[in-house]
Image (spheres, helix red, strand yellow):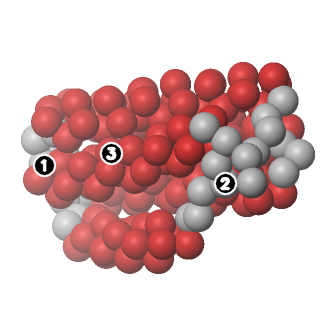
Amino acid sequence: MQLQLSQKEKSLLMDQKTHEETCVDKYAKYANQAQDSQLKQLFKTHAAHEQEHLNTINQILNGQVPNVGGQQNRGQQQRTNGTQASMTSSVQGNYNQEDAKLCKDMLMTEKYVSGAYDTAIFEFRDSNIRQVLNHIQKEEQQHGEDIFQYMQSQGMYQVQ
């Protein structure tokens, strides 16, 4: 069955496509710039997730309803590993300022992208597409949490 998208749905998807392309580019670029090996790996993992999101958005734009079942399990396993890794090193206050800037930028980007998905989800008629977009949004929120936890473990983010 070919999915019929409205003009508004297509427009929202094109925006999300641009956001995902930006995230892929930023994470890949920042993985190369990061000084801390743990942060490099976190950014590389997130770049791969963002590429999956981009592929999913392209599938929807091509009229297909993607299956995200396999991504959920793989993403959950990678998140668990990434979260545990970020909690192991606790060098309070002795962090690289450039790494902190990269983290702040990606955290801000993830907040924006997650919010854009929140808006898009409410505009889709097809409940399967809503579920797919909701799945992506949850992964975006998890990326933000991973970055937050890394920053907190490094003393970059102090919760008052």
> In what element is the residue under mark 3?
helix
Q: Which residue is mark 2?
A: 65
Q: Which residue is mark 3?
A: 47
Q: What residue sits 52% from the left and 25% below the top?
A: 18
Q: Is residue 151 above or below residue 128?
A: above
Pick the residue in front: 112 or 123: 123
Query: Where is residue 70 shown, x and y percent of the image?
Result: 48, 72
Query: Where is residue 4 shown, x and y percent of the image?
Result: 80, 39
Asked which quadrant contains residue 32, the reply is top left
Which residue type does callout 2 highlight? Val
Query: Where is residue 115 shown, x and y percent of the image?
Result: 68, 38
Tell which tag, 1 or 2, sits nearer the viewer: 2
Comes first in the chain, label 1 or label 2: 1
Q: Which residue is mark 1?
A: 36
Q: Is residue 44 above or below residue 62?
A: below
Pick the residue in front: 126 or 32: 126
Comes first in the chain, label 3 or label 1: 1
Query: Where is residue 94 shown, x and y percent of the image?
Result: 17, 48
Q: CA distance from mark 3 to mark 2?
A: 23 Å
